[in-house]
Image (cartoon, grey):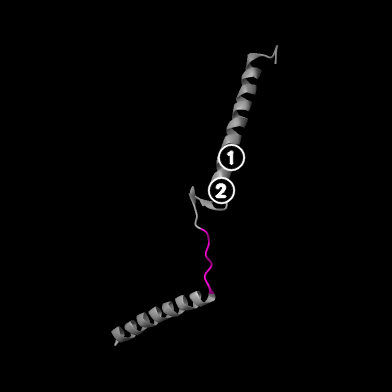
Amino acid sequence: MPGDPPVVTNLQKLIVALDGEIARLQEARDLLTRDNWIHGVKTAAKHPMSAEGRARISAAQKKRWAAIKQAARTAAK
């Protein structure tokens, strides 16, 4: 703007520079927060577990808990 005091011109330049920096940071944020990115590392595709698989895991865990409970009973005697 011809005729503007130097302070106004410098302020306008600063605002333009800040707007550019904000746009750059928003773009970087968008890249890092996409659905398939966490902490800058691409996550693997989800593989849902079948009901049969969950049942096998549940049975195995219950078996481990039973063994621990049994060991605690025999140690208490």
The disc label shown at residue 17, or none: none
Q: Earlier in the sequence, mark 2 or mark 1?
A: 1
- Classed neighbour count for the residue bearing mark 1: other residues with Cα under 10 Å, few (<14), some (14–19), many (≥20): few
Image side of residue 75 versus residue 20, left or right: left
Residue placed under numbered mark 1 in the picture: 27
Residue at position x 35%, y 84% from top?
70
Tell me the magenta residue range.
Answer: 45-50
Circle 1: element type: helix
Residue 22 coordinates in the image, percent (x, y): 60, 35
What's the amino acid at mark 1? Glu
Residue placed under numbered mark 2 in the picture: 33
Residue at position x 62%, y 22% from top?
13
Give the quarter of the image for residue 48.
bottom right
What's the amino acid at mark 2? Thr
Circle 2: element type: loop
Residue 77 coordinates in the image, percent (x, y): 29, 88
Q: Is residue 60 magenta?
A: no
Residue 66 coordinates in the image, percent (x, y): 39, 82
Give the quarter of the image for residue 67.
bottom left
